[in-house]
Amino acid sequence: MMTVEVERKFMCSANTLKMLEESGAVLVGKQQFRDQYFDTPQFDLTLRDMWLRKREECWELKYPLVPVSGRKEKSGEQSETAAVSTCYKEITSQPEIQLKVKDVIRDTETGVTCLDDSWLSRVNLVCFAEFTTVRQSFTLEEEEVKIDLDQADFGYNVGELEMLITEGEDVHAALERIDRTARKLGLTADQRVEGKMNVYLKRNLPEHYAKLLSVHILRA
Ligand code: V4E
């Protein structure tokens, strides 16, 4: 079963915690994790909007619900929430990740194993970004949307409203739930907010960041 992450980021300021409290959001957990992102030296994955990550010991590949090659210009009828939200498939099974990566990176081996160092070096994947996040997670009564406040160790804070659905389920309904939660929290949909990776790349790999902007994988 394939999971789809529907997500909207929001600006995190000194008032955000207070705003969440006043809206009735309840802190349900705090965790810290280190993310390592992998790509080839030519960035074959991220230039296709594919994000391969190892979070602590867990692997994950995120890639768009709508492939980069099939993207159309956004219609004028798109809702505000849709315009500021993202939709990515997430896979965590190592054999599945290998097969998906094989679609874009040549791998002469036929068998699938696990994502160990020998596989990484065979397909020429290297870590290009690494950072640690402290995440506070909240819930809001009657809402299924998860609220996260992230503090990345390179000095960037961002909030996220997130809903995981199963592939085939209604993305539009998830967007509406996110929208309803955003309204309960008093968030407006008037701006797109950069994710941690946007900011990390801008600061640490500006050339690659510029390339991702130019091919419309990321937006400034
Ligand atoms: C999908 C993606 C990237 C991978 C990181 O995804 P994200 O959900 O932003 O990170 P994080 O740490 O919150 O993961 P979670 O814990 O929710 O699984 S890096 C760039 N993208 C694409 C992307 C985009 N084009 N626009 C926005 C606003 N975000 C991400």
Image: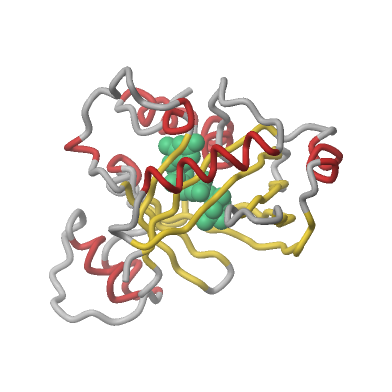
Vertical position of residue 43 compared to residue 71: above or below: below
Q: Residue at x 67, y 55 (%)?
A: 132
Vertical position of residue 103 compared to residue 93: above or below: above
Q: Which residue is drawn at 58% across and 40% down?
A: 180
Camera sees residue 129: no
Residue 27 image position (x, y, % from top left): 79, 58
Residue 121 shown left or right of residue 186 in the figure: left
- The residue nearer to you, when weighing 141 against 108, is 141
Residue 36 image position (x, y, % from top left): 53, 58
Residue 160 shown left or right of residue 164 in the figure: right
Vertical position of residue 10 compared to residue 177: above or below: above
- Report the quarter where the N terminus lies: bottom left
Residue 54 image position (x, y, % from top left): 49, 64
Tell me the quarter of the picture where residue 144 sits.
Answer: bottom right
Residue 123 shown left or right of residue 150 in the figure: left
Total marks shown come to 0
Camera sees residue 11: yes
**Colour mode?**
secondary structure
Q: Which residue is drawn at 47% across and 58% down?
A: 164
Vertical position of residue 196 compared to residue 218: above or below: below
- The residue nearer to you, when weighing 22 against 93, is 22
Pick out the residue farthest to the top.
76
Tell me the quarter of the picture where residue 172 sits.
Answer: top left
Tell me the quarter of the picture where residue 190 sits.
Answer: top right
Residue 154 image position (x, y, % from top left): 69, 42
Q: Which residue is drawn at 35% across and 51% down?
A: 170
- The residue nearer to you, when weighing 170 against 73, is 170
